[in-house]
Image (cartoon, rainbow, N blue to C red):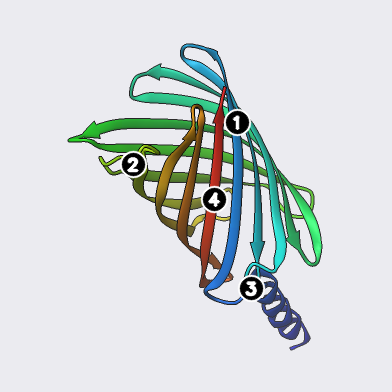
Amino acid sequence: MFKKLIVSAGILFLTVFAYAYDDNDLQIWNTDSEEFAISDNSKITMEEEFRWGDNAKEFYYHHYDAGLVYSLRKYLNISAGYRHIYELKRDKFKLERAPYAVAAFSWDIKGFKFEDRNRFEYRHFDYQADSGRYRNKITIKLPWKLTRLAIQPFVSDEVFLGFGGVNQFNQNRFSTGLGFNINKGVRAEIYYMLQSSKSAGLWKGANVLGTKLKIAF
């Protein structure tokens, strides 16, 4: 009986821990990135992202990212990189180290631009078992570019599949937004994302308002 009580308490604790924020929480995400061309078909990328949750009142996530992208074909880019992540857990920021590899396919159909991004991550932690993750993101850019800012609507959907300890479909992100040019080599996005995440057998959602800024050199 005592062991059952301990297990039940542990499950309850993990559930509360996993769901620090309420269902349908409002969040704000901001991403800034730079690209440095090193040849006609390769570039270095750098990225930094910040996230606020609990109705956008609490800063809970920050990552740095650096990678190398190479265009094998007009329709195929491959890349590899490393992401250094700090995420708020149990009132402390915990570190995750995540090297990754990506293969991204792209094509056009009657002006619609499609991208199929396949990302494989190895997730190393100091506070829990390491694991892997596969992420597949489909993006569709509509064939309209409005005003001199070249405002272009887009929709995307990304699924997350854990393996090596977390073997399950555990997250989905559906996004819609607008991309536009600010200046030569400077492009921005504003978007809404519905994020659905599963933990301890339960699903919860988050409403994310996001901005992205990319500078290409």
| Residue 180 on image: x %, y % | 43, 41
Dot placed on the residue nearer the N-terminal end, 2 or 4 = 2
Q: Is residue 187 above or below residue 157?
A: above
Dot placed on the residue nearer the N-terminal end, 4 or 3 = 3
Callout 1 crowding tier (Cα within 10 Å): few <14, some 14–19, many ≥20: some
Q: CA distance from mark 1 to mark 4?
A: 15 Å
Dot placed on the residue nearer the N-terminal end, 1 or 4 = 1
Going by the numbered disc 4, the residue's amino acid type is Thr
Q: Quadrant of residue 68?
A: top right
Q: How many marks?
A: 4
Residue 147, labelled with which disc? 2
| Residue 83 on image: x %, y % | 66, 38
Callout 2 crowding tier (Cα within 10 Å): few <14, some 14–19, many ≥20: few
Return the residue nearer the eye: 26 or 132. Answer: 26
Going by the numbered disc 2, the residue's amino acid type is Thr
Callout 3 crowding tier (Cα within 10 Å): few <14, some 14–19, many ≥20: some
| Residue 114 on image: x %, y % | 31, 38
* Label 1 element class: strand
Dot placed on the residue nearer the N-terminal end, 1 or 3 = 3
Dot placed on the residue nearer the N-terminal end, 2 or 1 = 1
Q: Is residue 57 above or below residue 147?
A: below
Residue 34, labelled with which disc? 1
For image coordinates 46% across by 14% down, the residue present is 41
